[in-house]
Amino acid sequence: MSATTQHAGANRIPTVDETAQNHSNYLTASRGIRSWLLTLDHKRIGVMYLISVLGAFLIGGLLALAIRLELLTPEKTVMEADTYNHAFTLHGAVMVFLFIIPSIPAALGNFVLPVMLGAKDVAFPRMNLASYYLWVFGAVFLLAAIALNGLDTGWTFYTPYSTTTNSSVITATAGVFILGFSSIFTGINFIATLHTMRPKGMTWFQMPLFLWSLYATSIIQVLATPVLSITLLLLVAEKALGIGIFDPKLGGDPVLYQHFFWFYSHPAVYIMILPAMGIISELISVFSRKRIFGYRFIAYSSIAIALLGFLVWGHHMFTSSTKLAAVIFSALTFSVSIPSGIKVFNWLATLYKGSISLATPMCYALSFIFLFTIGGLTGLFLGALATDVHLHDTYFVVAHFHYVMMGGTLVAFLGGLFYWWPKITGKMYSELWGQLSCLSIFAAFNLAFFPMFILGTRGMPRRYYNYLPEYQTLHVVATIGAFLLGIGLMMAAAVLIHSLFKGRPAPANPWGAATLEWHTSSPPPLHNFEHVQVANDPYALNEIVFDEANGGFVRRADNGSDPPAPSPATPQLPV
Amino acid sequence: MWLFLVSEILFFSGLFVAYAIYRNRHIEVFTAGSGLLDVSLGALNTVVLLFSSLTMALAVRSAQLSQRRRLVMWLSITIACAVFFLGVKGVEYSHKVHDGLLWQGAITAEPGTEINGVPTEKLGTFFSIYFAMTGLHALHIIGGIGVLIWLLVRAIRGDFSGTNFAAVDFAGLYWHLVDLVWIYLFPLLYLI
């Protein structure tokens, strides 16, 4: 690239024109279906993951709409009771195992992590590809369960029902078992990459917070997933051979299954939410044009959540464990809210006196804070023994975890997707329509799930096919909200797909962020960077200023004109 | 690789927890059940597996020193030990099948009779755990044999040298872990 050689600056950001000239980015470096399917490039694997998990999300979402449609009336609406059981089980299993767990780490993380580190790729590119194909095999097994006998156990596969039902429990658990390996591979890969491939000068405490959260996530993936694997293996052995470990008829203990299952699945909740928190830490800082407040606290709180997450599995079984154990688990559950609270307060402190721009990713980030706070605070009602005994297995629980999983993880995923979209595809989307999609998702989400809190406190049990007529009004409101939510998500998809064809080319740094992934062209070249990167301060946002000629942001030193246009200067807060 | 080993340990940990819980609840069943296992065959297997760990360590050393012929020899001995281990395990399993001492759902030893003071119907709990733990361990041995054969082929081809021995090293770590698991399984199932 001749233009680059004229400017000696090692980290100079290419302009739009150069990006357009730069023919060889990772998307165009090689052609043909084989070059995608057999690629070892983390960016292409990330894109394949992205397309696949969004496909899974579509399936899970359509199942959700089917469930909501059925619940429109107290009696049968569109499907038989048995079909309904299959629908909610598959909705849960697909959303949890195929979408939420791999969504941020495997799709966005795979793309962003090495570029954020200024590295060429992850530590083990082959293992990365293997992880993707394991995901595909796992998905095939899980979806084969639909095609065969369906699955009606609920996504938790609780014994003894799961060992006696005729539906395809073995196929589905085999799928989840394989997906577990996919998740472990991603985790090992990320840990090794973060340990060995940080650029020169990047200490642990100069890493962007998204990487801290991925690190914490990977720890959980590596430590918790094997326990799920052995549990499911025993479940399969129980069902196929009758080994009598979980089946009470053979002297087994079904509650032991629940302990094993939640020893994985509670930490898995943090696999889902921690990367989302990482994205929010980036977005809030960039779009407030301000250094993140309390960097170290946010970093440590990610690790604290990862570790405390291993100690709270018992709160799923308050009523089936001893009183003392329940008290201990309740106390530990409350302790998890401390690091979560630390994060929320630090984000709010970052907003304070920031120069906030309501770009689409920021709208999603603000929605996240709002929805996650509701989800988190209602979690305290469930962590408290006296209230949980009443709220257990009601719609209150359903509303709570949808606020955290969907209002939290999904909204952050969308925020991250809109944020990194220019980097991934090299196209800018329509800002106005992006903001509108966020607004409609936010409004429809609350319309769909807030009524469920009320339903739960009034005693509507979860997973029921029929209900008393008194509950119908709120169910109708929730169903309308669910369909509007579907429309909102379609709108977000339309905005992004439209940009692929009609969007203007993205500059290297459209948002004015300081992390390393914005130091390369959009989309990045095959090896990510033209030059070896050295670590910089990931939150030195006042170093980054808008450049008219470029159409994007550049570093102040690269701009050449001094004094630079005063970016909304804010006093630097101590880290 | 170390991370993978950690996840392996957690993979087995579930079974160890199950063992602890059921032993605690049915101490008499476990004492009776472990009395039915053949300690001498178990001990033989322990020795064989420990010896194979030694030969594996020697194989890693030969790879580091670029001694191709010795590497091939030590790897072959390790594989032979592993196959021997599985053979002994097979003999043990066939005895149990013959006596009808299977997992809970399939136990066929004469109902109504007592073995070591415990009704046969109850012994299945012990044998469920026994088969689950040793079965999973045996699967790991089989996987290990596969990896060792692959290494052997590459060693004969002369792929390894003092600068390129990582694969042998990692397989060695894995093999020691499988060995270590057995070191715990043997006393828990056979001795106490």
Image: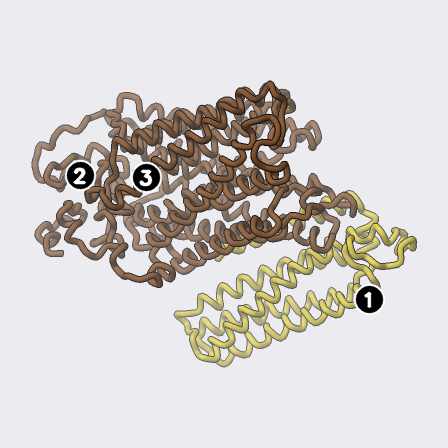
Chain colours: A brown, B yellow
> Residue under circle 2?
A552
Q: At label 2, which amino acid type do we have?
A: Gly
User: In the image, which disc is placed on residue A438?
Assistant: none
Q: At label 1, which amino acid type do we have?
A: His
User: Would you identify the image quadrant in which residue A79 lies?
Assistant: top right
The image shows residue A461, relative to residue A116, as above or below, that is above
Q: Quadrant of the C terminus of chain A?
A: top left
Residue A467 appears anywhere in the view: yes
Q: Residue furthest right?
A: B113
Which residue is found at the position 39% from the left and 38% from the top? Answer: A413
> Residue under circle 3?
A494
Which residue is found at the position 82% from the left and 66% from the top? Answer: B98
Judging from the image, mark 3 belongs to the subunit labelled: A
Which residue is found at the position 65% from the left and 41% from the top? Answer: A158
> Residue under circle 1?
B98
The image shows residue A344, relative to residue A493, as above or below, that is above
Q: At label 3, which amino acid type do we have?
A: Ala
In screen coordinates, is A457 left or right of A116? right
Q: CA distance from mark 3 to mark 1?
A: 66 Å
Q: Quadrant of the N terminus of chain A?
A: bottom left
Secondary structure type for disc 3: helix
Q: Disc 3 vs disc 2: which is toward the camera?
A: 3
Secondary structure type for disc 2: strand
Residue A393 appears anywhere in the view: no
Q: CA distance from mark 3 to mark 2?
A: 24 Å
Residue nearest the viewer, comparing A97 with B77: A97
Q: Are marks 3 and 2 in contact (CB under 8 Å)?
A: no
Secondary structure type for disc 1: helix
